[in-house]
Amino acid sequence: MPTTDHNSKNNILITGASGLIGPKLIRNLLEKGHSVSILSRKPHKIKGVKVFKWDIDSQTIDNESLNGIDTIIHLAGAGIADERWTKARKQLIIDSRVLSTQLLYRAIEETKAPVKTIISASAVGFYGDRADEILTESSTKGTGFLADCCQQWESAVEDGLKFGVRLVKFRIGLVLAKQGGALAKLETPVSLFLGAPLGSGKQWMPWIHITDLLALFEGAIENPNIEGTFNACSPIPVTNFEFTKILAKTLFRPVWPIKVPEFVLKAVLGEMSQVILISNRTSSQKLLNTGFKFRYAGLDEALKEIYSH
């Protein structure tokens, strides 16, 4: 994603900055000379960053947070796979995304903030379970909780178009990082010599190395030609079976010739087993067409980099 202007410095406001992506993104943006503020539920200190308070449940926000802000990176949202999906948990997963967006937009309206760009996270869960179908950004929404959640999230984000902004949405796959995220959970059984494909093993698992994901967000800030929805996933997707095999090889562990049956995963994880069992064969061609170059296109090299430390 070639940038058009390396010298322009932005005033950036980030929501959901304490997650997997936020802290690393803040560090990179500060290094590039951008000015960074964050919205947080708890006041705390981050060097070089202005921290403002908001509360999504009570719909309160410090309007000062939008002073002079030209770019918003919206990452807020309760973790999809952190807890079992009770009815209340599912509502929280949706509300933390939709209500946070509405709160943010109300503040933009009230303060008439000079926001030019809004970059939001979304997820490949938008497509639901699609077997081997190749999914592009214009593919229809799927069915199931994840698809419904992503649709509500994205349509709340699209309301930002009323401000005349440039809007970018990244439908993110499985983020591979050294600490945190889904990799730690997938790694545990393999490192305990219990590695086996999950379900049929044929389901496609779109993934992206965190370094590439950070580069995408940074590129979207700096390049005014990036607009619309993009699948934020490696151009070389893998099935669950291939993922397990490559992960086991990287960790010098065996893969058993059995599969963990779907009913076992459903018994252990409940409805949340969708996260592992649905198949999303996403295409990142639209991203490649912008000139973006993945540093880690293949899973082998991505995992090698992560476990080489």
Image: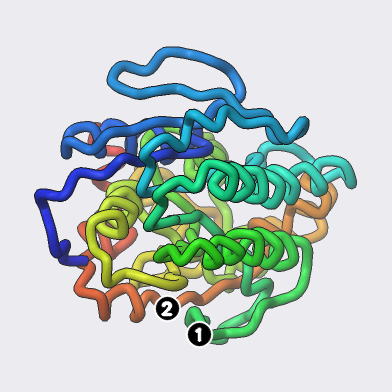
Q: Quadrant of residue 144 in the image?
A: bottom right
Q: Nearer the viewer, residue 43 or 20?
A: 43
Q: Nearer the viewer, residue 301 or 11?
A: 11
Residue 273, placed above or below residue 308:
below
Residue 208, placed above or below residue 304:
below
Residue at 50% from the left image edge and 55% from the top image edge:
121
Q: Whole-Å distance between the Cαs marked 2 and 1?
A: 6 Å
Type of amino acid under label 1: Ile
Q: Is residue 263 left or right of residue 306?
A: right
Residue at numbered disc 2? 283
| Circle on res. 134 | 1
Q: Is residue 94 left or right of residue 155?
A: right
Residue 297, placed above or below residue 290:
above
CA neighbours of label 2 inside 10 A, class few (<14), some (14 to 19), many (20+):
many
Q: Earlier in the sequence, mark 2 or mark 1?
A: 1
Is residue 303 at least partly visible in the picture?
no
Residue at 69% from the left image edge and 43% from the top image edge:
96
